[in-house]
Image: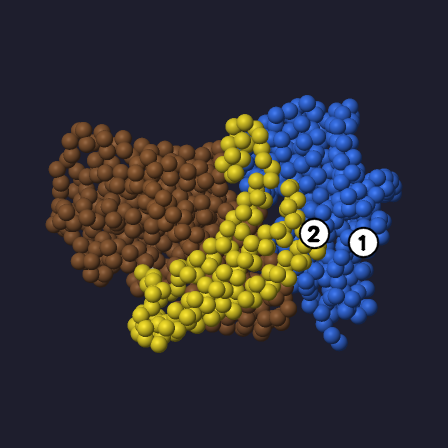
Chain colours: A brown, B blue, C yellow
Amino acid sequence: MADALMIGFGGLGLLVILIALRMPIAYSMILVGGIGVTILNGPAIFMSQLKTLAYGQFSIYDLSVVPMFVLMGNIATKAGLSRDLFRAANAWLGWLPGGTAISAIAACAGFGSVCGSSLATASTMGQVALPELFRYRYSGALATGTLAAGGVLGILIPPSVVLVIYAVIVEANIVTMFMAALVPGLIAVILFILTILVYVTVNPAAGPKRAPIDRAEFISASVSVLPVLCVFALVIGGIYFGFFNPTPAAAIGVFLVWAYGTVHGGIRWPQLRDALLQTASSTGMIYLILLGAEMLKIFMSRGGVPQAVAEWMAHSGLAPITVLAILLAALIVLGCLMDSLSMILLAIPFFWPVLVEINGGDYVDAATAGFGMTTEDLKVWFGILALIVVELGLITPPVGMNVFVISAMAKNVPMRETFIGVMPFFCAELVRVVILVAFPAITLWLPTLLRS
Amino acid sequence: QDTYTFKLHHMLSEKAPAHQKMLLPWAKQVEENSGGRVKIEVYPSMSLGGKPPELIQQVRDGVVDIIWTVNGYTPGLFPRTEVFELPTVYLNDPRATTLAMYDMFDMLKPEYKGVEVMWLHVHAGQGIQMVDKEVRKPSDFNGLKMRIPSRTGAWVIEALGAAPLATPVPELPQALSKKVVDGALIPWEIIPALKLQDQIQYFIEGANRERLGTTTFQVSMNQDRWSGLPEDIQKAFRDASGRDWWASVGDYWRENDDFGIQIAEKAGRNHVMLTEDETKEMLAVLDPVVDKWIAEVKGAGLDGQALVDQARDLIAKNATE
Amino acid sequence: MNTASVVGASLFTLPFPGDFELTEMGVCVAVFTFLPWCQMQDENVTADIFTSGLSRAWVARLVFLSAVVAFGFTLLMIWRMSVGMLDQRDYGYTTTILQIPHWYAFLPILVSLALLAVAAVLTMLDAARGSAGYHSEAEHPHG
Ligand code: NA
Ligand code: NA
């Protein structure tokens, strides 16, 4: 047993080396998983399992929503939604101090309500909002920082691909997870807006004021955003109120966004083809990581690693809240190296058993549970906290994909400045994590309400 | 002396009653019988990989040594055993039915290719769980949507005049609360895990606890692994999996089911038991399900009628034992 | 199909019991067809921080190495899933409601895997040129 455990931990070391050598994360997991199982139990087991493993993993019903949401987001990026959203947000919020940046955040939130990806949100909104921010002479740091941070709302506001994956790993209900993400997502929007207000109060030159727009533009801009609201209401509302399962809802969303883009003129065959091809490659990438993660999980279980970690943490005598803090901090650190999807797939299979153990098992009563809530609620609460901290990796050095995407668009702003500009938002996110940890009811309120 | 380690793989959580009260005690008994030469590691929650329907393939291939699985996950593979799932064949007695499977095992054995069966069992039967409609006769089902428990369960729902809808178990509470389905055919046993007492108003069964069919399960070992074991180790397994054990597994599923309905009753829900006449009427419309099954297994070269008669006989015999 | 089913199920109470398994099978087959394209687009996520300081030629060598792994794994999968297909056929595994034999789905999957092997070879050739100092067409920096 101890030998198996050593091999298991050795495998994790090899995984880090392979990833550092620029081996795709999916293939790193596949290699380590395959080699590990072969060393532990001989080649026959791994060979037999390969016969149907990929077929089984790729045909998990709950995952079928992933390509749908990816496609919906990809069509949305080309449908002209971002322009309308930004225009409407500007009409409503543009008059505030730092108003153009605040509008960008609001528009990112709107875009996030039809798009499940952070990078797509950052890049699409960046194309629309960055030129405006520079036109109004916003500082490079604030302009790029706002969009890099705003992009994160793509994942934090449902629909969210990472959240679907989390739900599949811990066997949570996707609908419940989407419900739980909504209020924390709105809190993120509010905190980001407050951050900008504080920022321009301290440094008024960074976000110059702008004249309010006229009534006609206000009305026309507000009307132009109605289609987005309708799509969100139908897709996410339809899921919340149980009219549709997530997969058909997402299929309807794809159709609506496509219809909008066609009528609106943004989508013709070349754009549609690009969206489909992009969806194909992103979906292939996501599923290959899923397969790798499954192979790694098999190896780790056979080596007894998750069991040992859970056992060790549970008997460490640490308070539940300390363990939670350690796990969240570990995710933030991992976020400096990895994308959020790989991280969720890699870390959650280790972290979740620890939390279940500390909470007191699957069927524990809230009154006697370590975290003071049932394990079902813990699943939801931890999922949202994990989602927030893995997304922090998108805006922290050294990798910070959102920062890369935005600074590639704003050629005149050095990347260092973007990282500096994003720091206040990073702090706002930490504040949000603290709020959500202190008051689990914020996360659990909507799922509980809609369940009854 | 050689020691033998076995990996037992299944889909439920390690806190699930079936893991704690059925699989672990059995594993412990085998270990004791072997004088410590056998070690059975039980892996819950599909932690050795794959989806639940792959379990049977995993044990046949030797990816794992032992599995606990639902026969219905791989439809068509266990047609003979399926007879025990049929409504009006399975009525209300998991112990008698599990023992009938034991007594009839020679007839069932041909379909367990590549595995050595440790034991088979059923759960306490599909109860009618309704969100807010009390159904007492077949016509009450008209226009309702019901969640399918299994292949033959879909036939039951159709025979009752309701529309069958496939809903994965984890989605069920949501589907019930939003009335995507009006009800479900599942045992009471599932109530605590899914907190169905929050969604379901009526838990309905027959006058003598009759249910509308059941589900069959197996615990099996890889055939080669089994054949390669020395006799004394085989005996350790055999002794832990004898007729008494099958009987107590049946009792265990009854107890667990009773626990579920107690939870619902405590929450103030209605545990409805139909009258004798209502029960008769309900079961009468399900006869065609049995006929349909007999016609279908004929295609696989099986004498369905003989299996039905034999199963009914043995269940009745074991019920009075 | 899916849209039709849910609209049917919720509005007109005309359910479509096999929709789950059709969706599962359809998505599975589709995802396999995406894999070659994903490989060609160099879409598989990598962590580039440790290697960002390396020369182009060295990065190309690492890309070559990962393409070799992709190629090897794909060959292994073609072999194992062919055996898997025969198993599925011989044991008669089918879907639950519609009773569609699972092995049907393996045929298009094997074709996709063959294309993935070709894609991996193309990546290898491209990376080999890159490591020898030629400009690499397939270079899509991630970030
Ligand atoms: Na989103
Ligand atoms: Na980062």
Position above or below: A252 against A308: above
Tell me where residue A44 sits by quadrant.
bottom right
Q: Which mark is residue C92?
A: 2
For label 1, the crowd category at 10 Å Cα-Cα, with few meaning under 14, some 14 to 19 and many 20 or more, is some
Q: Can marks 2 and 1 be said to lie on one chain?
A: no
The disc labelled 2 sits on which kind of residue? Gly
For residue A212, side relative to residue A270 (left or right): left
Q: Which mark is residue B109?
A: 1
Write the residue at 62% across / 40% down. B191
For residue A94, side relative to residue B57 (left or right): left
Where residue C26 appears, x then y in whole percent? Answer: 54, 47
Tell me where residue A323 sits by quadrant.
bottom left
Front position among marks 2 and 1: 2
Where residue B236 appears, x then y in whole percent? Answer: 79, 64
Write the residue at 82% across / 55% down. B242
Where residue A111 appears, x then y in whole percent? Answer: 32, 43
Task: Kindly identify which chain the residue marked by label 2 belongs to.
Answer: C
Quick one: A295 or B245, which is closer to the camera? A295
Q: Is residue B172 visible?
A: yes
